């Protein structure tokens, strides 16, 4: 524990909220460094924090700065992170190396879940989870996010899985690992830019109160592991399914031609999609993250009520 205290710096307002049982929502930082271009990345990160605060909840953006894990960033730190040229995309495997080398890192879904659990934060808002990549039967390209969901007690509010993935195999993997995939007021599992991936969630949940109760029961039963809370992009901001799927195929083809693999593939595809959709994919991405922030704050509030000392 002494080691963790030295390596993790929890922002005072986050620390105070956790100590008093008030709601906190964790936020990832790869959206700032790898998911969106400047200045949209900074604007979105700050807007998402503002939305969470509007609900009476404390946001905690997580990142690693010069070898120190930060749980809750200042506005200046967010801006600096967005401009920094060399920021490691930090998942579970990367954290010890980044800390030892005193580098800066932006946490993925897996990395953010891990740090959130260390800090005692139970609700995490992101855009979309990683998963099984298309062609994974040949490449074995499966995101570490899925393994983290299998073992780390954090609920992840997302707009489903990123459309660039094999969503069917992603859901099969989550089922095998015993991870509940719950739809917030929906039966359909969303596909990031669209509201319906063609697959269903395990259960539809109608309210933040009901969702918090499920979280509470699961973890009090000793059923370790996360929960996927699928929250579709608002209809007015969703992209046409045929349109975006064709653009994804085009981007995937280019990634194969350029031999882009591993942790570089998702940032490449998101950037390429922004280019070939003339910004439509970026606009949708921003709106879905903002919507997830609203829902995540509601769920965090209800969960805090259940666990108030």
Image (spheres, rainbow, N blue to C red):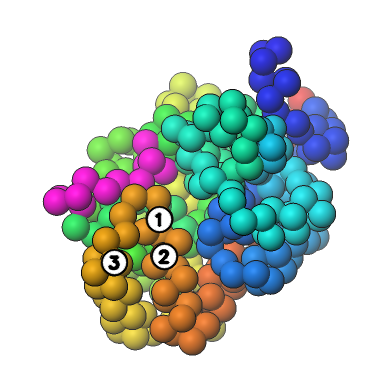
Q: Which contiguous range is marked in magenta?
A: 136-147
Residue 33, image quadrant = bottom right
Q: Is residue 167 left or right of residue 157?
A: left
Residue 111 location (% of width, % of height): 52, 39
CB of mark 2 within 8 Å of CB of mark 3?
yes
Question: Is residue 187 among the parts visible in the rendering?
Answer: no
Q: CA distance from mark 1 to mark 2?
A: 6 Å
Residue 251 location (% of width, % of height): 32, 74
CB of mark 1 within 8 Å of CB of mark 2?
yes
Mark found first going from the N terminus, 2 or 3: 3
Q: Is residue 67 left or right of residue 234?
A: right
The residue at 74%/43% (across/down) is: 72
CB of mark 1 within 8 Å of CB of mark 3?
no
Q: Is residue 45 left or right of residue 213?
A: right
Question: Could you tell me which quadrant the N terminus lies in?
Answer: top right
**Circle 2 crowding by C-alpha within 10 Å: few under 14, some 14–19, many from 20:** some
- 268 drawn magenta: no
In this view, which residue lies farthest toward the left? 138
Number of dots carrying numbers: 3
Question: Could you tell me which quadrant the C terminus lies in?
Answer: top right
Residue position for label 2: 268
- Residue 258 has which mark? 3
Vertical comparison of 118 with 254: above or below = above
- Between 125 and 10, the residue placed more toward the observer is 10
Q: Main secondary structure of the magenta part?
A: helix
Q: Is residue 65 left or right of residue 190?
A: right
Residue position for label 1: 264
- Between 134 and 198, the residue placed more toward the observer is 134
Residue 99, image quadrant = top right
- 146 drawn magenta: yes
């Amino acid at each position: 524990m002494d080691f963790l205290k030295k390596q993790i710096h929890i922002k005072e307002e986050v620390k105070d909220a956790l100590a008093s049982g008030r709601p906190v929502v964790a936020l990832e930082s790869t959206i700032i460094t790898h998911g969106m271009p400047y200045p949209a990345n900074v604007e979105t990160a700050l807007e998402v924090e503002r939305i969470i605060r509007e609900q009476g909840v404390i946001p905690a953006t997580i990142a690693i700065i010069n070898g120190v894990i930060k749980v809750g960033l200042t506005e200046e730190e967010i801006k600096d992170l967005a401009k920094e040229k060399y920021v490691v995309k930090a998942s579970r495997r990367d954290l010890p190396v980044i800390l030892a080398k005193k580098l800066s890192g932006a946490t993925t879904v897996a990395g953010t879940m891990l740090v959130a659990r260390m800090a005692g934060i139970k609700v995490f808002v992101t855009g979309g989870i990683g998963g099984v990549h298309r062609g994974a039967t040949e490449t074995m390209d499966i995101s570490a996010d899925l393994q983290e969901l299998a073992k780390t007690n954090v609920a992840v509010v997302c707009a489903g899985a990123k459309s660039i993935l094999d969503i069917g195999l992603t859901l099969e993997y989550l089922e095998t690992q015993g991870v509940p995939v719950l739809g917030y007021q929906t039966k359909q599992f969303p596909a990031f830019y669209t509201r319906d991936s063609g697959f269903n969630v395990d259960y539809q949940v109608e309210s933040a109160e009901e969702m918090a109760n499920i979280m509470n029961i699961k973890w009090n039963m000793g059923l370790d592991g996360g929960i996927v809370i699928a929250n579709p992009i608002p209809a007015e901001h969703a992209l046409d399914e045929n349109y975006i799927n064709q653009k994804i195929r085009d981007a995937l083809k280019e990634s194969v031609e350029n031999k882009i693999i591993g942790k570089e593939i998702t940032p490449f595809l998101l950037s390429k999609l922004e280019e070939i959709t003339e910004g439509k994919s970026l606009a949708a991405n921003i709106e879905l993250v903002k919507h997830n922030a609203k829902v995540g704050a509601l769920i965090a509030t209800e969960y805090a009520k259940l666990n108030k000392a």
